[in-house]
Image (tube, rainbow, N blue to C red):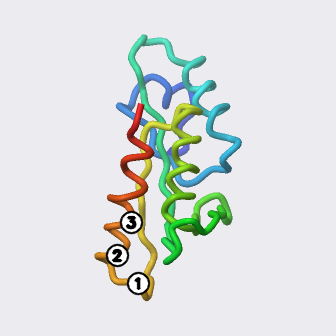
Amino acid sequence: GRCRQELSWLANEPDAWIWHGIDEDETAPAVKKLNDLNEDGNWHPFGYQNFVELLDDPDAPCHLFNKIYLRGGAKSLAEFWRKQREQGLSHVIINLKPTKRPIEDCLADLHDYVFPEVNRD
């Protein structure tokens, strides 16, 4: 969060700023603002947290609700976060929501579809 800190402080003091969710079109402006306010010359990464519900169908489209709850198939989630990475997002905290799916299946989907896509150059 921000702990009521000014953006100029966040752009210069902490090692990184991990925010709660934001709209997907707010990522690039947030990263730009932090970079513009940076005075120490060090990179201060920006990240956020999503509550995530991985659906059975890895191709199911993803939808972001209330800026923080992301629901969809693993492939569409990977594409969502890849686009966010291109806008400057450097960290995502994934908070898996309770689901009827076995956790092993959710972790396999993250391993097979999400991590390779999001981490590729």
Q: Is residue 90 left or right of residue 71?
A: left
Label 1 neighbourhood size at 10 Å, few (<14), some (14-19), many (20+)? few
| Residue 72 image-quadrant placement | bottom right
Tell me residue 61's x, y (percent).
64, 64
Q: Are marks 1 and 3 in contact (CB under 8 Å)?
A: no
Label 2 neighbourhood size at 10 Å, few (<14), some (14-19), many (20+)? few
Q: Residue 68, relative to residue 28: is it above or below?
A: below
Q: Is residue 115 left or right of residue 37?
A: left
Q: Residue 47, relative to residue 21: is it above or below?
A: above
Q: Amino acid at mark 1?
A: Arg
Q: What is the secondary structure assignment of the residue under circle 1?
A: loop
| Residue 30 image-quadrant placement | top right
Q: What is the secondary structure assignment of the residue under circle 3?
A: helix
Q: Are marks 3 and 2 in contact (CB under 8 Å)?
A: yes
Mark seen at residue 105: 2
Mark seen at residue 109: 3
Q: Residue at x 68, y 41 (%)?
A: 26
Q: What is the secondary structure assignment of the residue under circle 2?
A: helix
Q: Amino acid at mark 2?
A: Asp
Which residue does the numbered mark 1 point to in the structure image? 101
Give me the C-alpha separation between circle 3 and circle 2. Answer: 6 Å
Q: Is residue 54 left or right of residue 83?
A: left
Q: Nearer the viewer, residue 7 or 117?
A: 117
Q: Residue at x 45, y 75 (%)?
A: 97
